[in-house]
Image (spheres, rainbow, N blue to C red):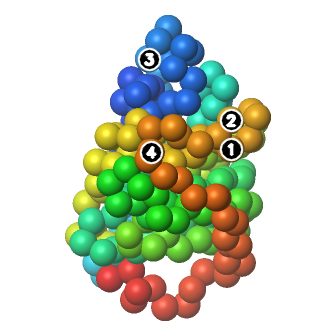
Amino acid sequence: MEIKPQVRFLKEIKSLLFDKNWSKTAANSKLYYIYRAVKKKGELRYDITLIPPRMLGKEFVKTKGNRNSNSYSELYTVLKGEAIFLMQRSEGKTVKEAFFSRLKKGDWIVVPADCYVVAINPSKKDLKLANWVSEKNKNAYETIEKMKGACYFFTENGWIKNENYKSVPKLKFKKPLKKKPKNLSFLR
């Protein structure tokens, strides 16, 4: 059975981009592809996301960004290319904590249950990600949509704060894991 990808189009994230002038005239196009439930292990689902290289004006291509529902954590790895994961803990217009990780092929990162996460392709090569998450999870987008993006944008000039938030802390670096955790029960 072939799994058809969910395709995320530019029009779905235009309001979440840094470069508003560019987004006004940019043609709608495919940004990335999500293959859900490629594998299953009990109640856990293994998804693959393919993000081709691209600039969205001055900003590197990224996912829409989401938070997991019902206190579910998520485990990501890079299968090909390199990725930046931006994570934030928010309460309304205030960001309590913001951190990022830079992953290469074979690196892993745990996204805590209460964090919004955005995956970014900062290179000129395809990015292929995989993640394990509970099938009971539902993606939540409310803060990212209301605030017109995550708390930082990753641009050709580096990190730029999203001025729509009332308060954004300094961005911290979080080191990725070099090995997959042996026990995935924390994802349930």
Mark 2 or 3: the one toward you = 2
- Residue underneath mark 1: 159
Along the horizontal axis of the image, is 8 left or right of 23? left
Looking at the image, tell me whether mark 2 or mark 3 is earlier in sequence order: 3
- Callout 4: helix, strand or loop? loop
Q: Position of residue 29 (x, y in %)?
A: 47, 21
Disc on res. 165:
4
Q: Residue at x 59, y 36 (%)?
A: 61
Q: Position of residue 163 (x, y in %)?
A: 51, 38
Q: CA distance from mark 4 to mark 1?
A: 15 Å
At label 3, the amino acid type is Asn
- Residue underneath mark 3: 28
Instruction: Please say if the residues under marks 3 and 4 sit with CB atoms less than 8 Å apart.
Output: no
In the picture shown, does residue 154 fall above or below 112? above
Image quarter of residue 9: top left
At label 1, the amino acid type is Trp
In the picture shown, does residue 67 fall above or below 112? above
Q: Residue at x 56, y 15 (%)?
A: 22
